[in-house]
Structures are given as C-alpha cells and as structure tokens.
Amino acid sequence: MTRLMAFRPDLVVNIEAVLGTGTAGLRAVERAIAVYLTAEQRLGRVPAGADTEALALAVVGVLHHVALTEEIDSGADTRIRRAMAALTDSFPAVAS
C-alpha cells in the first residue's frame, strides 16, 4: 500500500473524498498507531512517560522505509522486529 500511495498520491485524495479527511495516507496510519499506543499506555503496557505520538512516527518511519527500500522478505521482517524491539525496550513485560 505504501508503494502504491508513493507512486500514486492522487489515491490519498480519492480515498479521503469517499471516507473523509484524514482517513488515508501515512498520517492516518500514524494517528491510528498513536491512538493505539495511548490506549496501551492507559493499560500500563506502555510506560507513562512515553511520547506515543513520537513513537507512532518512528513506527511509521521504520515500516515506510523498509517497504520502500527493499523486498518484503525474512530479512525485512528481522529488521522491523529489531527496530520495534529497540523502540520498546523500556516497556513493561506483558504476560502472553
């Protein structure tokens, strides 16, 4: 999806025409991730002092970079997991 929107930015405008402003594109994904992280913060699974908006931007940045710069394969998966682990090292342990 990221590659498609990068090559066809008009799609964001078209999607928003149907679904409403702010519903498409990377900013919409960033907002959704920030909302999710804030909810997890309220549950104690994200540290109280964590900047959820900055974390959301970092997550989108990592995913966007990997999606646009390399093939999606096990190497990409490893890079994404390593980046997410680095961002969440200080998070409390959660029983699975």
Image: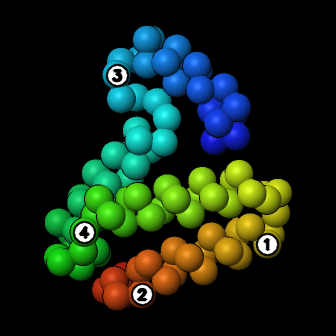
Name the spot of residue 21 as percent of width and height, x first.
Answer: 34, 22
The residue to which callout 1 is attached is 75
Mark 1 and mark 2 lie on one chain; the one further toward the N terminus is 1
Mark 3 and mark 4 lie on one chain; the one further toward the N terminus is 3
Name the spot of residue 62 as percent of width and height, x first.
Answer: 56, 63
Give the residue displayed 28% in from the left and 51% down from the top. Answer: 35
The residue to which callout 2 is attached is 89
* Amino acid at dot 2: Asp
Mark 4 and mark 1 lie on one chain; the one further toward the N terminus is 4
Quarter of the N terminus within the rendering: top right
In this rendering, the label closer to the viewer, 2 or 3:
3
Residue 51: mark: 4
* Amino acid at dot 4: Asp
Q: Is residue 95 visible?
A: no
Where, by quadrant of the figure, is residue 5 drawn? top right
Could you give the CA–CA distance between mark 3 and mark 4, rounded to whole angstroms? 25 Å
* Amino acid at dot 1: Gly
Where, by quadrant of the figure, is residue 7 drawn? top right
